[in-house]
Image (tube, rainbow, N blue to C red):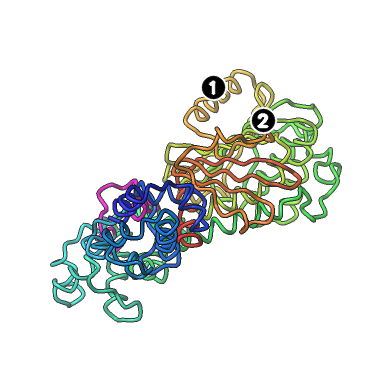
Amino acid sequence: MFSDRLDEIMNALGTDNNEIARLSGFDRTYISKFRNGKRTPRIKGASAGKISAALIACAKEHSETDTLVNITGSLEISGVNEYLFKDEERIRRSGKTLKSRKRSIGSSFSPFSGNNLSRAMFLADMSNAQLSRLVNVDASLISRYRTGSRRIDTDSDIAGNIASLLLSRIERKGLLPELASITGVSISEINKEYFLGWLCDPELNEKRAAQSAEKLLNAFSSLDGNTGISLPSLKDAAPSSILNETKEYYSGYGGFRDACIRFLGNVIEQGVDEIQLYSDQGMEWMINDKAFLLKWTALMKECVDRGTRISIIHNIDRSLSEMNQAIISWLPLYMSGMIRPYYCQKKPDERFSHSIFLCPGKYCISGSHIRGTEKNGIYRFITEDPELEILHEGMNRLFSYSLPLVSITSEPETEKDIPEDAILLDPSSFKNMSILVSDEYVRIKRLTEPCLTFTFTHPLLCQAFLSYAERNFFS
C-alpha cells in the first residue's frame, strides 16, 4: 500500500511530516493523510511526483541516498514512484480500494459494494444471469462490467438497455428515494440520461460533489452582506389589510403566502424574540411567485435586523444540490448571527408533507397534506393557547432530532482547535478564505470583512469538500 511504503521510506530516512511538506510544497496535514492511508494521490498524478521528488531531495539532504536506493532501487522520480505504488493497481482492480475511495456519497448503504452497476442491481434485486437474459448479452459481460475489468460504453445500445431496465425496475419497486440517496441527487433529477451517466462514470458522484463544493466556496468568497436586490418596504411587503386578518383557514398556495406575510409582519410589529420554521414540502409555493419571494426576503431580513432569532430546519434530506441551494440562499441572513440552521436526522415522510411556522405562545401556521396536493391544500393560522403549546412541544421534539447545519462564529481560531488529521487546503488558491477539511467537518474562515468562521458537519457536505480536495489538490 502507498501509505505503508511512504511510511517505510520516511522512517528509514529519519524525516518527518514537516520536512516532506516543506520539500513537496504540501501542507503537513496532507503528508499526515498520506501516511495514515486516509488519502492517496493518483498513481500518475502530479502529487505523486511531488512526493517522490521530496523523498529524493530529503535523502540527499540527509546523505541517505544509498538508503533510498536500497529500498526503492532507484534515485529517479519514476523509480521511487513505481515503488510507492507497487501492487496498487492490482489492489484497485480487485475492488479493495483505498479508504478514501470507499467513502462515496451514499456509502451509508453498507450492502452496496463494487461499482455503480452493482449498487443499481442490488436495488433492482437482479443477478448477473437475470440481467444478461433481459438485455440479451452473456452473463460474463455483466460480471466484467461489475468488477471493472471492462468499462461500459455510454453510447452503446447495451448501456442504454441496461439503464432503462434497471431504472424501470427500481421505480416499480418504489425505491427511487434509495436511489436518490446513493446518487446524491434529488428524485426529480433522476432520469434515464442522468442514470446512464452515473452507471458508466464511476467518478460522476465525486465530480458533482466537487462542483457543489466549488459553487459554495464561490458564494462564500463573494459574500458581502449586500444582495444587490431592491426589496419592497415593510409597508408594501406586509400591508395592514393582511396583518389585521383574523381568519383561521387559508386555501392553496395563495392563501399560504398571505398567511406567511401575516405571520412575519406580526413578528416584526410585536418584536418577537424567536420563531421556529420547518417545512418539507416543495418550495414552488415560494420561488414561483417572484413578487412574494421579494416580500418574504424583505420580511425575513427585517426580522433579523430587529433581533428576532430564527431557528430553521432545512429540508436537505435527499440531495447535495438542495443543501447547496439552501445554504447559498440564506448566506446573507447567516451573517446577522440571528439564524440557527439545522438539518433533521430522521427521514421525511414520503406520503405526507408538513409545514409548521411557529411563534411560540402567539401564533402558528400549520399545514399537512398528501404529497402532491399542497397547491390546493388548507393551511391553518392557529392562535389558541392549548394547541400552540402542543405544537411547541412537537417542534422542540423535532429540533431534538436535528443537528446544526452550520455554526457561525467570529471568534479567532487557534492552532489547538485544528485536529491532526484535518486538511488545510492550499491558502494560495483562495484570495480571502482559509479552508479546513476533515471527515467530520468543514471549516471556512473568511479573512476579509465580514471575518466569520462557518463550520459544517453534514456528512454529504464533508464528502463534497473531500472530493473537491482530492480532485483539485491530489490530482
Q: What residue type is labelled 1?
A: Glu
Task: Indicate the secondary structure of the residue bearing disc 1.
Answer: helix
Q: Which amino acid does label 2 sit on?
A: Ile
Locate residue 416 relative to residue 150 in the image: left or right: right
* Closer to us: 69 or 314: 69
Residue 389: where, in percent of width, then height?
59, 20
Image quarter hosting the C terminus: bottom left
Task: Indicate the secondary structure of the residue bearing disc 2.
Answer: strand
- Residue 295 badge: none
Q: Do the residues labelled 2 and 1 touch (CB within 8 Å)?
A: no
Residue 38 located within the stretch drawn in magenta:
no
- Residue 393 badge: 1
What is the spatial separation of the Cα atoms under label 2 and label 1, in whole angstroms?
14 Å
Instruction: Bin the neighbour count of mark 2 within 10 Å (Cα to Cα): few under 14, some 14-19, many 20 and up.
Output: many
Outermost residue on the top side: it is 386
Up the image or down, 18 lies above or below 382; here it is below
Residue 216: where, in percent of width, then height?
60, 54
Q: Residue at x 66, y 46 (%)?
A: 330
Q: Residue at x 51, y 47 (%)?
A: 437
Residue 109 located within the stretch drawn in magenta:
yes
Q: Residue at x 57, y 52 (%)?
A: 324
Main secondary structure of the magenta stretch = loop
* Closer to us: 49 or 389: 49
- Per the rendered image, the range of residues in magenta is 100-119
Residue 449: where, in percent of width, then height?
76, 45
Up the image or down, 316 lies above or below 172; here it is above
Residue 161: where, in percent of width, then height?
28, 75
Which residue in the protein does label 2 denote? 275
Disc nearer the start of the sequence (2/1): 2
Image quarter hosting the N terminus: bottom left
* Closer to us: 281 or 271: 271
